[in-house]
Image (cartoon, rainbow, N blue to C red):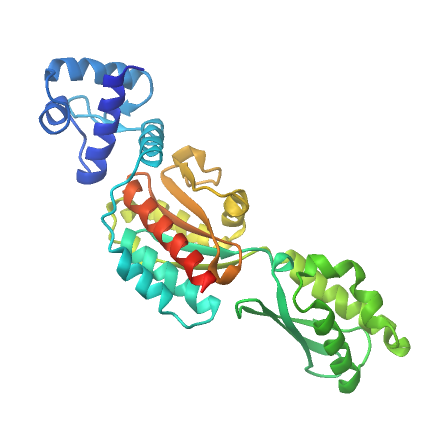
Amino acid sequence: MTERQLSIILAVVYDYIMTGEPAGSRTIVRKYIKGISPATVRNEMADLEELGYFYQPHASSGRLPTARAYRLYVESVTSRARSHSLDEADIRSEILGSKSTIEDLLNQVTRLMARLTNCVAVAALPTLDDAEIQHIDLMLMGSRNVLALIVLKGGLVNHSQFTLPYDVEPSMLEELSRRISTFACGHSWNDVRGTLYKYVAEGLNDAQETCRAAINELDKFLSEKNYKFFSSGALHVLEVPHFQTLSRLQTVLSLLEQEKPLASMVDKCRNSKSIKIAIGEENQTEGMEDNSMILIPARPRQQKAVLGIIGPMRMDYERAINVLETVANTLEAESRR
């Protein structure tokens, strides 16, 4: 590919992001590339269409970018210094001024990202078994029914209900709860699950099976619950022309509701140190072929998390990336306070 062809691709993508209209050769010459004729640009655009970078919605119209063209544009955006049009001081003030729990903080962050990008914003906290435990409390809700409250570092609270195989005395469950919490505090479930039963059951000879059942239920809950998701912006996308098509809107709402496909995408970013961008068909989830997703790792309250933006392929990638990077950097700073 020549430098001129690359310039034409970047110009067509940028113009379409800004205007929503197909870009013709005269537009490209007038607004972006000086010193060449519209006929030359038109010939280059025809060649680039054959190479899969453009398509024409109508025979007489200008060109629209394909996912392949968007990929080149995004690589250009991420490889250069970006202009910062955001009011970063306001973003930092809004996040750093928060005294809320990590759940409230991430709800606030997704609302902020959605407002700044006009896209759907998501945040995901990692698997519970990998998060540091602060406290576990088991409360008897009947002769055998138990409510487990698990408090993680940062104040995130999760709960589960399960049924024990035998009746249990409140005093015994209280002692079991104390032992589990004491042993697990300051560690992840992954770190303690292998030796927890031996420590907890010692001296509780009459309650061996009850101990084992309770720990097994906790293990099942903490191991199977992959992420806690937060999202905002569904109302924003109703104003985006791309989502006026009902099937496209349903795809995004279904992705947020089902969570498993979203968890698969988040998994790929979770341990990364760089931003991940999936454009169009690069998204492996059915129905996401017309959308893009941008994900970035973050550390709110010293916990691993992932922040993301979901929107149409024709999103303002530079602004969305700026928003995600600014918010992630601010959360990192907030964690160090």
Residue at the spot 28% in from the left edge and 45% down from the top edge: 319
- Screen quadrant of the C terminus: bottom left
Answer left or right for 106 relative to 32: right
Answer left or right for 158 relative to 178: left
Q: How many marks on residues?
A: 0
Residue at the spot 30% in from the left edge and 37% down from the top edge: 81
The residue nearer to you, when weighing 318 against 55, is: 318
Residue 154 sits above or below residue 293 on the image: below
The residue nearer to you, when weighing 296 against 224, is: 296
- Screen quadrant of the N terminus: top left
Q: Residue furthest right?
A: 205
Q: Position of residue 164 (x, y in %)?
A: 77, 73
The answer, for residue 268, to whether it is visible in the render is yes
The residue nearer to you, when weighing 13 against 95, is: 95
The residue nearer to you, when weighing 324 against 287, is: 324
The answer, for residue 315, to whether it is visible in the render is no
Q: Position of residue 119 (x, y in %)?
A: 32, 51
Q: Position of residue 201 (x, y in %)?
A: 84, 72
Using the rendered view, name the quadrant where residue 291 is placed: top left
Q: Position of residue 146 (x, y in %)?
A: 70, 77
Answer left or right for 279 relative to 87: right
Residue at the spot 23% in from the left edge and 23% down from the top edge: 7
Answer left or right for 78 relative to 90: right
